[in-house]
Image (cartoon, grey):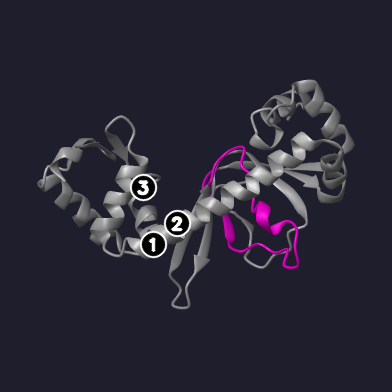
Amino acid sequence: MKPQELYEIMSKIPLFKGFNIEEIENILKKLNFQIKNYKKGETVFFRGDSLEQIIIILSGTSKGEMQKFNGDTITIDYITPYQLIAPAFIFGSNRTFPVDLIATENSKFVFLNKDSFLDVMQKDERLLVNFLDEISNKGQLLSKRIWFNFMNKTINEKVLSYIKENQKNGYISFKPNISELAKKFEVTRPSLSREISSLCDKGILTKIKSGKYKFNSDNI
């Protein structure tokens, strides 16, 4: 990756909100960093691996997974471009990955030296505030998901809650796919498919094309 291309990508990352290309270039020159590529299906990190760097996904997507005692896996989250990886675990007494991180497509990550980053962050309040915002946003998202699973106990309640929160202009797509969403809801794929079919029968959903539906809230 050419330096200018990297600077332009970094300018889109929330961590560098408010910085221009020249400022980002100057910051990166002060940091020791590496760019690493991972292939689809490759494990980027295992749960328990040491976390001693600032890691940002530049392209591609990855997912965080946890394995149950019976061998089943639960998808905790999907990591899309420009996100920090596990920012709340970079500092503190237990600096390890809380989940397995697996590339769901060919992906590119940048690894920043934590000590150098900390030094720069202490000298620029904008970077410090952006980093704290990232930690707070992740914490709020986790709290929201815990509340979601606690309050929405039935498949019907989980699906309707998901639809209401993720529909855009009356349309909903079950992303990234039904199988992965079923893991997130901790239900089987057939059960989730049946529930979606049931919502279609009731007129709450109308299938537009594969994976996309119109949400008819008046029919709830």
Task: Estimate the x, y position of residue 108 in percent, counting from the top left.
Answer: 65, 40
Marking on residue 71: none
Task: Estimate the x, y position of residue 111 in percent, counting from the top left.
Answer: 75, 45
Residue 90 magenta-highlighted: yes
The relative height of residue 146 versus residue 197 in the rendered view (above or below) is below
How far apart marks 2 and 3 lie (CA) works out to 18 Å
Instruction: Report if the CB atoms under discs 1 and 2 are less than 8 Å apart.
Output: yes
Residue 72, image quadrant: bottom left
Q: Earlier in the sequence, mark 3 or mark 1?
A: 1
Q: For mark 1, does the 10 Å Cα neighbourhood hold few (<14), some (14 to 19), or many (20 or more) residues?
A: some
Note whether residue 37 is visible. Answer: no
- For the residue labelled by badge 2, is the local secondary structure a helix, a strand or a loop? helix
Residue pointed to by mark 1: 149
Amino acid found under the numbered disc labelled 3? Asn
Q: For mark 2, does the 10 Å Cα neighbourhood hold few (<14), some (14 to 19), or many (20 or more) residues?
A: some
Q: Earlier in the sequence, mark 2 or mark 3?
A: 2
Amino acid found under the numbered disc labelled 1? Asn
User: What residue appears at the point 12 percent right and 42 percent down from the top-left corner?
Assistant: 203
- For the residue labelled by badge 3, is the local secondary structure a helix, a strand or a loop? loop
Q: Nearer the viewer, mark 2 or mark 3?
A: 2
Task: Estimate the x, y position of residue 99 in percent, counting from the top left.
Answer: 58, 62
Residue 127 magenta-highlighted: no
Q: Is residue 219 left or right of residue 67?
A: left
Residue 130, image quadrant: top right
The relative height of residue 7 versus residue 207 in the rendered view (above or below) is above
User: What residue appears at the point 45 percent right and 66 percent down from the top-left corner?
Assistant: 73
- For the residue labelled by badge 1, is the local secondary structure a helix, a strand or a loop? helix
Residue pointed to by mark 2: 145
Residue pointed to by mark 3: 177
User: What residue appears at the point 59 percent right and 54 percent down from the top-left corner?
Assistant: 42
Magenta part of the chain: 79-105
